[in-house]
Image: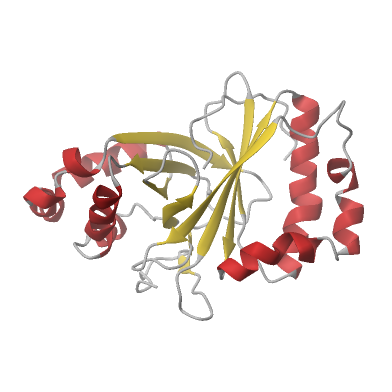
Amino acid sequence: MKRRVFFKTTIVSSAAAAILPQIGFAQLKPSNKMQMYYELRTYTLKDADQLSLVEDYLERAAIPALNRLGIENIGVFTELKPSAQSIVIVLIPYQSLHEFETINDRLEQDKLYLTKGASYLNAPATKPAYERIQSSLLKAFKNMPGIELPSKDKRIFELRRYEHASEAAGTKKREMFNDAGEIEIFKRLGFKPVFFGETIIGEARPNLIYMVTFDDMAARDQHWKSFGADPEWKKISAIPEYADSKLVSKITSTFLQPAEYSQI
């Protein structure tokens, strides 16, 4: 993908359940069956040159190198309805904190990566490759410990962040997803969630972040309408301790489209 359109900066900067019998929708289970960790990385870019440089680095250097190191299914996204400044959002899954901690050292030993990424890695201070990178480290939910891949059909993604007034409220909201059945409702209604994660390190904590996918905006609106009317959701949300007004203080949605080379 070599877009030259500029995208608006969003607030998102942060970054195994049973497989559903859906065509083109598979779950990636960590080899140790433990919860995965996700880096959700946001590149802020000021112009077409930076956009081109970052995309070339991701497509030709970073993603192939990470794949060689066993890190697969890396997502790259831009905003669906961009305006003003450009952003590129990258989702990188890790099997463990150790893998996350050591990845940069391992990349520095990869000569092909250093060669392919030279323009980005060695960009001068007078002409940097990007304005800033902001990253969040997330821990996957226990009831969805790995990424689930949607089909490669044309689709859009919604990245949602729920901020909590306190750590206790965040714990309760994750309980609502994991133990009260909210994740299962998403799957049953066809939201095709990609991941759910608690933000361990990142801005606007405490919060959780998750990603769902739809055919288009009309399908997205219909799915959320169905969710609000779902009898099981009404039952769960009627429980006093799960009232969203107590557990979620702010919701941020960002609508994304995958890059042509995205693995999600």
Residue 206 percent across, percent down from the top left: 37, 45
The residue lying at 85 percent from left, 45 percent from top is: 121
Check the image and report above or below for 255 versus 146: above
Q: Describe the colour scheme in one phrase.
A: secondary structure
Farthest residue, direction bottom: 32
Residue 102 percent across, percent down from the top left: 70, 66
Check the image and report above or below for 12 versus 149: above
Q: Nearer the viewer, residue 134 or 76?
A: 134
Let me know if residue 72 appears in the view: no
Residue 202 percent across, percent down from the top left: 50, 45
The residue lying at 29 percent from left, 55 percent from top is: 186
Count of numbered circles on the image? 0
Q: Nearer the viewer, residue 241 or 6?
A: 241
The residue lying at 50 percent from left, 67 percent from top is: 36
The residue lying at 53 percent from left, 49 percent from top is: 15
Left-right relation of 147 to 260 = left
Let me know if residue 23 appears in the view: yes
Check the image and report above or below for 179 versus 242: below
Q: Nearer the viewer, residue 232 or 216?
A: 232
Query: Which image quarter: residue 207?
Result: top left
Residue 126 percent across, percent down from the top left: 87, 26
The N terminus is located in which quarter?
top right
Query: Which image quarter: residue 145?
Result: bottom left
Farthest residue, direction top: 84
The C terminus is located in which quarter?
bottom right
